[in-house]
Image (cartoon, helix red, strand yellow):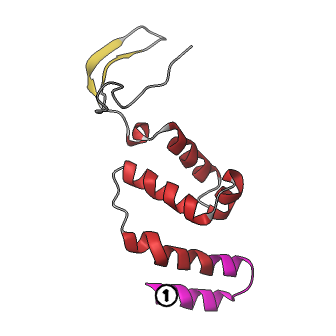
Amino acid sequence: MKKEVISKCPICGDELSITRLHCHNCGVEINGEFSLSKLCRLSKEQLTFVLLFLKNQGNIKAIEKDMNISYPTVKKILNDVLVNLGYDVGEEEVGKTAIQRQEILDKLANKELSFDEANQMLKNLK
């Protein structure tokens, strides 16, 4: 049984690196210092969220349903993932503007707004 690669040292919490690669087919081994991908830095819960996010093609409503959590919780998890991957998440976009944008898109999807109305409202947010 293969074990999953861990990215943090269980003793000090610092980042781990890989020093040996092995091909099970031909037996070749490569030694050196290799870094882990950004995705390896995510916790199991965060990686599960990313996979669910991709499965739902970024549709936050679908993620809310699948995880049985609220919109703000989905946004918080998404922002935590982005920060963990090293991206700067500005408070402006994270907060009020992002929520307003999603509300407009939800109203458009529910046919409470016309395309032109939604488009104008989205332009006014920028």
121 inside magenta stretch: yes
Horizontal arrangement in the rendering, residue 1 relative to residue 68 (left or right): left
What's the magenta region? 105-126
The residue furthest right is 111
Compared with residue 106, is residue 44 higher up or lower down, i.e. above or below?
above
Between residue 60 and residue 13, name the one nearer to us: 13
Q: Secondary structure at mark 1?
A: helix
Residue at image coords 52%, 37%: 44
119 inside magenta stretch: yes
The residue furthest left is 32
> Residue 12's image quarter?
top left
Q: Which residue is mark 1?
A: 123
Place of residue 116 in the rendered image (x, y in percent of width and height, measured from the top left): 62, 91
Compared with residue 49, is residue 88 higher up or lower down, i.e. above or below?
below
**Residues packed near mark 1 inside 10 Å, few (<14), some (14 to 19) or many (20 plus):** few
> Residue 88's image quarter?
bottom left
Between residue 90 and residue 72, name the one nearer to us: 72
Q: How many marks?
A: 1
Residue at image coords 45%, 51%: 81
Compared with residue 66, is residue 8 higher up or lower down, i.e. above or below?
above
Place of residue 50 in the rendered image (x, y in percent of width and height, measured from the top left): 54, 48
Of helix, strand and loop, which mostly describes the magenta segment?
helix
Compared with residue 103, is residue 56 higher up or lower down, i.e. above or below?
above
Residue at image coords 41%, 7%: 27
Name the residue type under label 1. Answer: Lys
Q: Which quarter of the figure is the C terminus placed in?
A: bottom left
